[in-house]
Amino acid sequence: MKRSILILVLSLLFAVSGLAQDFSSLKKNISEFTLPNGLKFILLEDHSVPIIFFATYANVGGSDERPGIFGISHFLEHMAFKGTTEIGSKNIEEEQKLLAKMDDVFEKIKAERGSPYPDEAKIKAMDAELEKLGEEASKHVEPNEFINILERNGSQYLNAGTSKDSTMYYYSLPSNKLELWAYLESSRFIDPFFREFYKERGVIMEERRVRIDNSPLFKLIEELVAMSFKNHTYQELGIGPMSDIKNITRDDMYAYFKSNYHAGNLVIGVNGDVTLPELKKMAEKYFSKMPSGKKNLRILTEDPEQLGEKSMTLYEDSQPTVALGYHIPSVLHPDFVKLQMLSNILTDGRSSRLTKRLEIDDKLVLSSAFFPGFPGTKYPTLFIFFAMPNSGRTNDEVVKVFDEEMEKIKKNGVSEEELAAAKKRLKVNIIRSLKSQNGLTISLLQSEIVKGSWKKAFDSLTELMAVTTEDIKTVANKYIIKSGRTIGRIEKKEEKKEAVQ
Amino acid sequence: MKFLNRISIILLAAALCCSFLTSGLDAKSRTVDKIKFPPLKNIEKPQVETGQTGNGIQLRLIKNDRLPVVDFMIILKGGDVYDPKEMTGLSSITAELLRIGGAAELKPADLDKALDDAGISIDIYSVGTSFRIQVSCLREDLDTAISYLAKILRQPTFDKEKLEEIKIKSSASIARRNDEPSPISDREFTKLVYGADSPYASVQEYEHLDKIDQAAVAMNYKKYFAPANMLTGIVGPVTMDEYKAVIEKYFGDWSHNADIPALPGAQEQSHDFNIGFIQKDNLTQSYLSIGHLGVAYDPAEDAKIKVFNNIFSEGFAARLTNRVRIQMGLTYGIDGGIVTANKYPGKTYYETYTKCESTIKAIQAIKEEIERIRKEKVTEKELQDAKDSFFNSYVFEFNSPDRILRTRLYREFNGINLDSAEKLIEDVHKVTADDILKTAQKYLHPEKMLITVLSDKKKLDGDLASLGKVKELDIAIPQPKLAEIIPDATPESLKKGQEIFAALKANQYKGYLKMKSMEIKGTVKRTMMGNAMDIGMKLSTLYPDKRYAEISMMGMKIEMIAVGDKGVIKAMGQQQPMPEAQLKDLNSNDPWELFNNTAAFKIQYLKETEVDGNKYDLLYVTNAKNDWQKLFINKATGLIEILEAMSAGESGPAIKRSVSSNFKTISGIPMAFNSKEYVKDKVEAEVILTDIIVNPPLKPELFKIEDPKK
């Protein structure tokens, strides 16, 4: 979930293509090829240090889920580190037998849970049985072998992330380990084995507790998206509700894996000390066996126009915080870059309008942010404003000042000078972001999946640099509309008040 | 210039001799066991060029022409750990005010705009034992960027209003520090390990902020910001000559010496408990830390500690992760280790979080792993895996010029031998399973381990007392203390206080005993958001505890209703509960309660005092909740003219002093029609009343709080 914000930021920086002179040489170092099964590879050569960054991008994420299995994309991301039938097992036949038994027990647990009056004692007994079988299965597991192999071979940045739009897996290795990557990465997506499934469920539940359930701020975000989307699956943050996390089955997982993890729905990005022929050789040797398939189509569910302002207040043991969400189109729409520029003008730097007004002139907030593209960018999404008022100041004061600033922009637009300064800052940021080619690789993959080509990542740079003051005024009037927004607030819970109720 | 250095040769040797070890399985038929790796290519490590200006500024450069941007970094000795306890956070504030407080002829806003327009970023912050400055800009703007930086570092103006801006934010951060759970347990654990008074654990409080003024910041700045204390580095398309020239141009004639105090030490703390428990209602997860004071960096021990940490707690494959996350499914993350700081003892600790219902189970699992690694040697495979991981990932040290430069500056700053990397590689080779056992025994001391648990007690899986002696830690945020020390009450001072008050009650103020309601109308003049504003106000009170206020400003009407300890604010068609502090404010300044329920207060006579030539008897009044107020009674007129109390304040809690004047007698009671409210000797508001009505008829409906849920 955190990752999706990072990707958003990276893509925001990068999407400002148009710095033609700085990108032309870069573009020359990028090449691509596709295996007969349809699996596409994008390579960014860089031989300055003998290391390679690898990223596998799956065109599936939280948005592709449905009630009952919300959170499965993220759960699957965790299972992708559990090895294969070959990696991670001391005795795969015994493991398979025990897991099949466990699956049967879990089916019974689920059936009981789904009955009108579940027998808790019965469920508890079956849970104990499941745990016992799990301990037995552990005896046949080579603990953590998949990760272990990578770590002892020097992997860095080993991680993965699931967003509403996609699932991504990545790490770096010394460049002499190219073949090890090709073997491990292809096996985990051709021949995975979802061992320790029932234990990992506990891990994911803890992840939900730490990220959302015990954080007032993330509870607020969860509520804000839930209110904002009536039909679209952007209504849910991605990790899934506890009840779905608890009830997803291994069969669900294999079925989901089968329909989403195949050559047509994955893209692989490689960046570093490797040549095209070297990469091709390894790709053909290890990835050709991957089944082909059709790329997931875009979800067609749409939300109608939001008919009125929605709001909700969370009473927490926390200082006040406010969040606003405005509906905006997806990254595919030409207005998206204009909204990105609006965000930059308003919030980038101490002299930017909104930051200056809220933090400096009025000393109203401790911190604030205003950016487009949450919880995703692939589908129509939100422009989000967040602020934490200073002590003694209120959420309503913040909203009032925010509204005033928006009215000014809607009425008078922004100055040419402001726009030019914002573009200059953006240019420096983009060039600096190229220092990390890992981020660039990820942006290319995202562009490839969402827009159909990695080259589009460069095109939107031109579009961004072409944004005019008139565009800014137009999009502000079109999208920053009170009647269609959603407001979430955290207000301090008054202990005594609770007692009265 | 690039060259093949010694490190790459050693690495090459390492890669050849500890080639891919099999995972201990017999199944050699597996593909993974058959893959052969070619030797790793030579690492071409970019060279760091060194230089120095005439006045002692150190220059380090990695020339890199790939992108037209320059990253410039400065490290100076200094920072928060050197701050006096009573001004905790002074250095962070100094760093921020340097950046935003204006420089030379540039007003703060002009400086912000100049930098933003040029796409130049300058960040200054205090980190541990250092100040760090990070500048980035396009190559073509380097001269401009350094010229601004020189103004900032040499001629800062420390604008008063900007200091206020920082203090308001610091104050908000203090108020917010218990909002999210995970920083709480970390902070409280660190306090137990180093002691709450140690600069390595100190936490900024409101009373520290009160003491930090422009003079304190300016003095602190002078101590550390001086040319010979500046270790600088650049990565970018710049030559050493160009680098030196631009620094000489803007800093060359700067002569000033730093005055850096000795780095404070850290001592082991003794506590009469070993578990600190923090209660937070409604949590579903416990946040746990376990450990004790650790050790400082020691090159002789570095390799052993690195290998130990890798096996025990670092990364996905480490023992603790394997046990608590993978095998038990009790957490999403567990980390920590023997963390060596550079010149003072670090922490040796482990931390995680788990659902409340498995708290004790998780603590026990961690303790068992600690016991195990202190008793049994690690396996040869674990040892070899850890070494392989170290050697194979070593190439990432050279991942980017920025990283190489940062590492270089960091080593120089901390006085670490620049050849320590080569030595470390040799030492890691030599580490044995026996060394790991000895390392565990030497650095992990279960009998000294402190545990902090932040949780909701009623959900725990047992009694924490089963693990040791528990003390509940209070994390309530201390409100600012009075500047003066209030002497303890004595029977004499209480008697005198009561006598003076009884005289007021029997004479001028006796009308208060018959007062059932009151209504006042008037204007509050105050400066808000930089503008002078008149706020219309009407306040109706139905004693004892019903208040209704109507406030009009900028064409907007705000209503506040308070009934007892419940209050709401209504504005723009919306209703919100009134924060406790504001509720208190609304109920303050009215002595009715004091006159009608005198027994509920402790009234202590402090002293005779003089304000603006008038003599006053000063009474210190506290209630059962320990809320205090000070009454200044004019000795000549017998009027309560000045009142001091705590107020919610615009920039966090502060002491507010109301000075009343223009007294008129209304229904036999002296009432002030004018008053000025001071916070820290600054007039925050002026109240001018036009009407005061005693015992007006008030309808009870006025004070009705509607349930917003309906």
Image (spheres, rainbow, N blue to C red):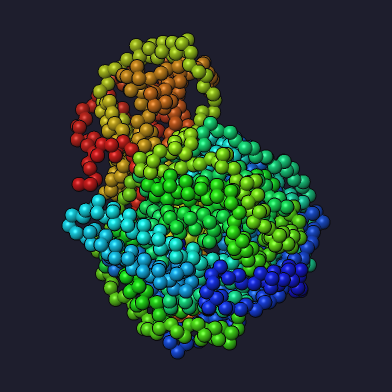
Residue A48 image position (x, y, % from top left): 66, 76
Query: Is any atom of residue A306 visible in this view?
Result: no
Left or right: A288 in relation to B295: left
Residue lying at 24% horizontally and 45% vertically, measured from the top left? B708
Residue lying at 33% horizontally and 61% vertically, measured from the top left? A245
Q: Is residue B3 above or below residue A348?
A: below
Query: Is any atom of residue A130 visible in this view?
Result: yes
Residue lying at 39% horizontally and 53% vertically, measured from the top left? A209
Residue A279 image position (x, y, % from top left): 56, 83
Residue lying at 55% horizontally and 52% vertically, measured from the top left? B336
Residue B19 image position (x, y, % from top left): 64, 72
Q: Nearer the viewer, residue B506 or B45?
A: B45
Residue B338 image position (x, y, % from top left): 61, 50
Total numbered badges shown on the rendered structure: 0
Q: Is residue B239 above or below residue B629?
A: below
Q: In which quarter of the image is the N terminus of chain B?
A: bottom right
Q: In this view, does B238 lie above or below B438?
A: below
Q: Nearer the viewer, residue B114 or B251?
A: B251
Left or right: B72 in relation to A40: right
